[in-house]
Amino acid sequence: SQQGEEDPQALSIQEGENATMNCSYKTSINNLQWYRQNSGRGLVHLILIRSNEREKHSGRLRVTLDTSKKSSSLLITASRAADTASYFCATDATRLTFGEGTQLTVNP
Amino acid sequence: DAGVIQSPRHEVTEMGQEVTLRCKPISGHNSLFWYRQTMMRGLELLIYFNNNVPIDDSGMPEDRFSAKMPNASFSTLKIQPSEPRDSAVYFCASSFGGRSYEQYFGPGTRLTVT
């Protein structure tokens, strides 16, 4: 499978803490994307990192990409209750395919 | 911009009936995607159009499923006949530039087949 695989499957933290989610994939990619899905809603694009980039920031989000290890991480700093959602990574490879996601719960 | 628009938002139908889901992509986007999401199988790409032409339909589960994009502003996903195992949330997404660009998702259609 070429899909991204996130871990952990579930993560529960306190408001203010940092949350780190990881994604692994199996084939060469052009880019990797992270999305968020709130319960009952469509996915929302968070950030895209290209294969020639190692790190990218967007607000409280920091994404890293290690193409040698075929892995990426998403760090959410100073988490808020509103960050509670499922987070997916997706790789373009031949088809943009999504992993099963990490369910993040931020407790107030 | 109104974003990707999907209709209906909820659909309940009986097994054997025809179901048609509709999608209006964001104006100016040239790529459109249909996904299905279930607890068991996660988020699956069903079909991908670029410039109204189906590019990858390898995710379409079987002949009961068909998708069309008659113009740049409208697409349909049809299931005929529907079965209980088709119950899922169906998402439409669009992008400017294809698979390698960020996709904008619609709110989804929750389909229940009884």
Image: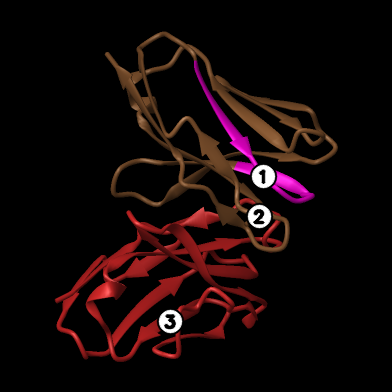
Quadrant of the frame with the N terminus of chain A: bottom right
**Chain letter of the brown region:** A
Q: Is residue A16 above or below residue A58?
A: above
Residue hosting label 3: B76
User: Tag 3's secondary structure?
Assistant: strand
Judge whether A98 appears above or below A95 on screen: above
Q: Which chain is red?
A: B
The magenta segment: A19-33
What residue lies at 53% left-to-right and 73% top-to-bottom? B59
Residue A2: percent from left, percent from top? 65, 55
Q: Which residue is mark 2?
A: A2
- A33 on left or right of A65: left
Sequence-wise first label, 2 or 1:
2
Q: Amino acid at mark 3?
A: Thr
**Subunit under mark 3:** B
Residues tagged 2 and 1 counted as in contact (Cβ below 8 A): yes
The residue tagged 1 is: A25
User: Callout 1: few (<14), some (14-19), or many (20+) C-alpha neighbours within 10 Å?
Assistant: many
Q: CA distance from mark 2 to mark 1?
A: 6 Å
> Which residue is at the far top?
A16
In the image, what residue type sits under mark 1?
Tyr
Vertical side of B73 occupied by A80: above or below: above
Q: Residue furthest right?
A: A52
Element carrying mark 1: loop
Chain letter of disc 2 in the image: A
